[in-house]
């Protein structure tokens, strides 16, 4: 009878050890394959969402009409858009999620709406999202974007991806609604001291500031003075009334606002109205008429009439010129000027009439 020999204890232990080593190696290999695969998938997810977020930000910046983000690094990107339903649009981070808010707030139209849309999913965490406006004089502003996303794993399985970019606007600022400040008398437009707008074109009214007294201002400034009821401008460091403020109108009348004399044809008037030249009038009413020196004044009554209705000068007051005088009647007579005030003929002081008595 033939006996069958089995495995000895030593052989069994040896086989079990070899199997454990091979199994452990295969398990380690499988674990590493699964871990690497998971990391690759997780890394792809982080990269994909990071790329999507950057492309979304780039598209919004290019379509924007203005960038209101500060020139220092900030966590919120605010863009003004042409579409009123999307104006303004904000990009920001909240609880590790990159969010976008489009449209105006219900109560404060210059702010973004409180409702927002997630740009990233729960598979990634937004570690940082920084924005900064970069100015280029003579060109469109840019936005410097710095994004860093990571997966939700911890320890050695933690994967982070970062992306930095500079994005330019491609269109000029345009608005299809009112551009209003959120507070009165607090903000300025194009007044930084060194950077100014070149031209301004309006199709309707330009409302200037209404101030009761002269402000500091700079040369070229204008405003409306509510005390003197006049427009005032600053030139050579001094404020002064502008244009028609030297002449004021009341109903159908107009009068000069000058306290001194008024000259026509002369820069040194010697009377309330001093005309250097020929003046014409169809009727002159006055209490007294005087010669050129202001003396020998006579009243209308002394001249035998009520008004001087017509006076004509045929020449330039040279010898032989004719002077026709009418005193409340037809022309009395014609006198020839011979270089002296003979025949008791006198010119009025302002040179627009003459009389004889």
Image: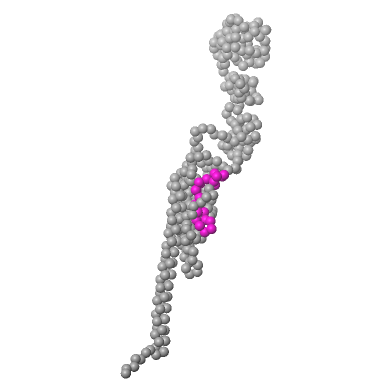
Question: Is residue 262 among what the camera can see?
Answer: no
> At x 41% / y 75%, what residue is drawn?
27
Quadrant hosting residue 109: top right
Count the marks.
0
Residue 37 % position (x, y): 41, 68
- Residue 291 to residue 256: above or below: above
Which region is colored magenta? 88-112
Q: In x, y percent, where is residue 48?
A: 42, 59
- Between residues 141 and 59, which one lies in front from this camera angle? 59
Quadrant of the snapshot with the N terminus: bottom left
In the visual, does 22 lie left or right of 351? left
Q: Please report the residue visible at 34 percent of the width from the left and 93 percent of the height from the top.
A: 3
Tell me if residue 91 is in the magenta stretch: yes
Q: Picture coordinates of residue 52 (x, y %)?
A: 43, 56
Q: Is residue 198 magenta?
A: no
Q: Where is residue 133 in the image (x, y as percent from the top left)?
A: 50, 51
The answer to whether 195 appears left or right of 238 in the picture is left
């Amino acid at each position: 009878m033939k006996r069958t020999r089995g495995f000895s204890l030593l052989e069994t232990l040896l086989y079990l050890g070899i199997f454990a080593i091979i199994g452990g190696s295969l398990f380690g290999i499988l674990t590493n394959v699964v871990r690497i695969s998971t990391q690759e998938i997780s890394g792809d997810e982080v990269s994909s969402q990071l790329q999507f977020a950057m492309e979304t930000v780039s598209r919004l910046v290019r379509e924007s009409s203005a960038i209101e983000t500060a020139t220092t690094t900030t966590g919120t990107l605010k863009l003004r858009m042409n579409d009123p339903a999307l104006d303004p649009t904000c990009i920001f981070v909240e609880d590790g999620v990159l969010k976008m808010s489009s449209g105006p707030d219900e109560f404060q139209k210059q702010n973004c709406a409180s409702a927002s849309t997630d740009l990233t999913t729960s598979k990634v965490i937004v570690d940082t999202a920084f924005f900064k406006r970069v100015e280029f004089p003579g060109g469109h502003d840019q936005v410097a974007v710095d994004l860093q996303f990571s997966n939700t794993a911890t320890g050695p399985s933690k994967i982070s991806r970062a992306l930095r970019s500079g994005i330019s606007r491609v269109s000029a600022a345009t608005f299809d609604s009112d551009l209003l400040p959120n507070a009165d008398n607090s903000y300025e437009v194009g007044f930084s001291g060194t950077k100014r707008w070149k031209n301004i074109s309006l199709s309707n009214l330009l409302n200037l500031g209404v101030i009761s007294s002269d402000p500091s201002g700079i040369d070229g400034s204008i405003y409306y003075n509510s005390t003197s009821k006049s427009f005032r401008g600053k030139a050579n460091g001094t404020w002064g009334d502008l244009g028609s403020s030297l002449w004021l109108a009341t109903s159908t009348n107009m009068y000069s606002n000058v306290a001194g004399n008024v000259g026509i044809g002369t820069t040194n008037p010697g009377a309330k109205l001093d005309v250097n030249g020929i003046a014409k009038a169809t009727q002159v009413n006055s209490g007294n008429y005087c010669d050129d020196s202001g003396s020998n004044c006579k009243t209308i009554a002394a001249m035998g009439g009520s008004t001087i209705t017509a006076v004509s000068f045929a020449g330039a007051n040279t010898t032989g010129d004719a002077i026709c005088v009418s005193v409340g009647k037809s022309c009395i007579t014609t006198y020839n000027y011979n270089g002296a005030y003979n025949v008791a003929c006198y010119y009025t002081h302002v040179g627009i009439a003459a009389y004889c008595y």
